[in-house]
Amino acid sequence: MKTIAITGASGFVGTSLTKYFSDLGYKIIPISREILNNKSKLEETLNSSEIVINLAGANIINRWSESYKKLLYSSRIDTTSKIVNAINSVQNKPKLLISTSAVGIYDNKTTYDENGSFSNDFLSSLCQDWEKEALKAKNETTKVSIFRFGIVMGKDGGALQKMITPFKLGLGGVIGSGKQAFSYIHIDDLINAYKFVIENEFDNLFNLTAPVPTTNQGLTSALGKTLKRPTILPVPEFVLNLIFSEGARVLTDGQSAVPKKLLDLGFEFKFKTIEETIENLCK
């Protein structure tokens, strides 16, 4: 029986992965904050784990005060650093670390595969530092893959759960111009990508996004069509800036990314378009 240790196991993606891999017969060890902050317990956990999945991090869609930006940073970089140090210290090193990042690493000038150019804002810098920290775990035994997430869409949590209520009430609409890119992935495809990379022990950077990028307008139209509700009330950017300050950029400055490396390796997406994704999740 293979053992998977997971940070951030109580979050939306973490609980989905825990259930999926438990059903497949894997032993799952959640890396709680107590384990994470106890060097010997963390080393004991990783010494008996073949796979480590690193999902820890404070919610990115929030008001970015200076103190919250520090929390966004420490909850990702410091956690990853503890995982990396433990991997490098134990005798029985895990075969694979899959660490998380985000397509927010890219600028928003065009559509990018994994070789896209980076932005120079806070979110991109955060992702770059996060990835550099994770890659320090790479050694003769341990491979490292990094998953750059788009917006994860699922029924039981994540972004869709937060945005669907106003749409159901007929109060949904585009954010700002609606032209900003919206890179997303269905939770089922995300989970299957983990299985694909774990079973093949791939060692690479992957965009975890659906193959057909869309825009905020495309998302809005798909929600309106599936829910049979009007989508005529736009959300002005200045309102989001008042609520989220700099954090509003997550919603107003989207990146367009495609999963070239997964597709090149033969991974098959079940939900390739925003219409297929929303139809499946909202009907």
Image (spheres, helix red, strand yellow):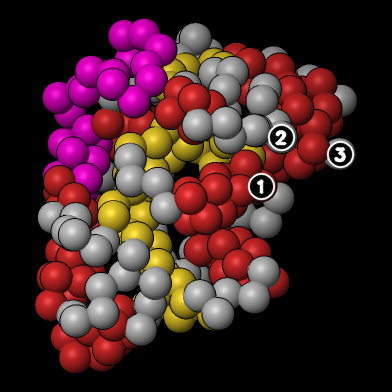
- Judging by the rendered image, the residue that carries numbered circle 1 is 188
Numbered disc in front, either 1 or 3: 1
Q: Where residue 56 appears, x then y in whole percent?
A: 34, 62
Residue 270 is tagged as 2
Q: CA gap, disc 3 to disc 2? A: 16 Å
Labelled pair 1, 2 in contact (Cβ < 8 Å): yes
Q: Residue at x 17, y 59 (%)?
A: 139
> Which residue is at the front of the view, 264 or 226?
264
* Type of amino acid under label 1: Asp
Q: Nearer the viewer, mark 3 or mark 2?
A: 2
Closer to us: 78 or 143: 143
Of the pair 212 and 2, the residue shown nearer to us: 2
Q: Is residue 156 left or right of residue 108?
A: right
Q: Residue at x 57, y 62 (%)?
A: 17
SS at mark 3 in the image: loop
Q: Residue 84 location in percent, x, y?
A: 18, 65
Measured from the top left, where is residue 127 in percent x and y? 23, 41
Sequence-first tag of 3 and 2 = 2
Of marks 1 and 2, which one's residue comes earlier in the chain? Answer: 1
Specify the segment rendered in magenta. 107-131
Up-down relation of residue 236 to residue 153 (above or below) = above
Magenta span has 84? no
Instruction: Identify the residue shown where x is 86% and y is 25%.
Output: 228
10 Å crowding of disc 2: few (<14), some (14-19), many (20+): few
| Figure disc tally | 3
Q: Nearer the viewer, residue 183 or 98?
A: 98
Which residue corresponds to mark 3? 283
Q: Is residue 151 left or right of residue 280?
A: left
* Local secondary structure at mark 2: loop
Question: Up-down: is 251 above or below 195?
Answer: above
Callout 2 amino acid: Lys
Considering the image in quadrants, where does the N terminus appear?
bottom right
